[in-house]
Amino acid sequence: MTGSPDSLAICLFGAGGHGRGIAAQIAQITGVMPVFADGSLPVGTMIGEAHVHFTDLRDVAAHDLLITIGAADVRRKYQVEACALGCRLTTFIADPGQYFSPPPGLGTVVLSGAVVNAETRIGEGVIINNGAIVEHGCYIGDFSHIAPGAVVAGDAHVGADVWIGANATVLQGITIADGTTVGAGAVVTRDISAPGTYIGLPARKVE
């Protein structure tokens, strides 16, 4: 889905803050308000702890579906389950005029103000958040999250399940190992081969 109206509302699974933000962008761009598959759950329910399964939810099969849970491990769990059940996963690109690469993998969202430049490959279940920039020739692995205002410079390789924090910068050609967290405002100047949490300028491992 790249900003074109759809006859049937897209279905979102994950009614927290991240999901509501995606819902607002979809509604404004397409003119159709999404529905939340988990909207009937008690307020404050944690999806990952609720033992909720798509087979328990009504009408999911009738809609294109996005898993809108911010936590990568939980997002991955429910996307895998959705695929196994034959649900129709989709993608959402808020500003297709700022997206210059091949289509991203299923379940990926590229939100308002984000720029994805030429020849970048984006995996499944990725979040490219508001105002993030992913430059030319990059690779962003499955279920990674590029937070608001972050910059991934050209030809960088970001592994799976990586979190790049708000306003962080990954310099050109850098490789980041699967499962790494880069803190807000950090600058990654060297390859990261061991997963962990990295903060500061230059970014250094803290745990």
Image (cartoon, rainbow, N blue to C red):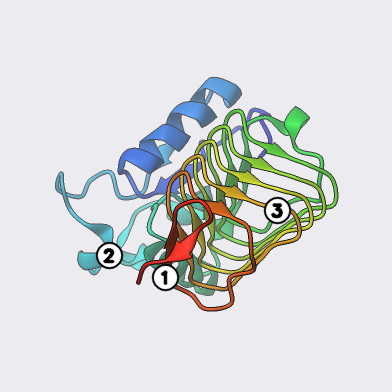
Asked whether disc 1 touches disc 3, contact meaning CB atoms under 8 Å apart, the reply is no
**First-in-chain label (3 vs 2):** 2
Where on the picture, by quarter, is residue 51? bottom left
| Separation (CA) of disc 3 from disc 2 | 25 Å
Asked whether disc 1 touches disc 2, contact meaning CB atoms under 8 Å apart, the reply is yes
Q: Tell me the crowding category of disc 3: few under 14, some 14 to 19, or many 20 or more residues within 10 angstroms, Cα based.
A: many
At 44% from the left and 27% from the top, the residue drawn is 24
> Residue reaching furthest front?
202
Between 80 and 184, the one nearer to me in the picture: 184
At 79% from the left and 57% from the top, the residue drawn is 155
- Dot 3 amino acid type: Pro
State the image coordinates of residue 62 (x, y, percent, origin top left).
Answer: 51, 50
**First-in-chain label (1 vs 2):** 2
Between 165 and 94, the one nearer to me in the picture: 165
- Provide the secondary structure element on which disc 1 rests: helix
> Residue reaching furthest right?
119
The total of numbered circles placed on residues is 3
- Does residue 207 appear to the left or right of 96 in the view shown? left
Q: Which residue lies under the disc numbered 2? A: 48
**First-in-chain label (1 vs 3):** 1
Residue 77 image label: 1
- Does residue 150 appear to the left or right of 181 in the view shown? right
- Dot 2 amino acid type: Gly
Q: Tell me the crowding category of disc 2: few under 14, some 14 to 19, or many 20 or more residues within 10 angstroms, Cα based.
A: some
State the image coordinates of residue 147 (x, y, percent, origin top left).
Answer: 49, 45
Residue 104 image label: 3
Between 12 and 199, the one nearer to me in the picture: 199
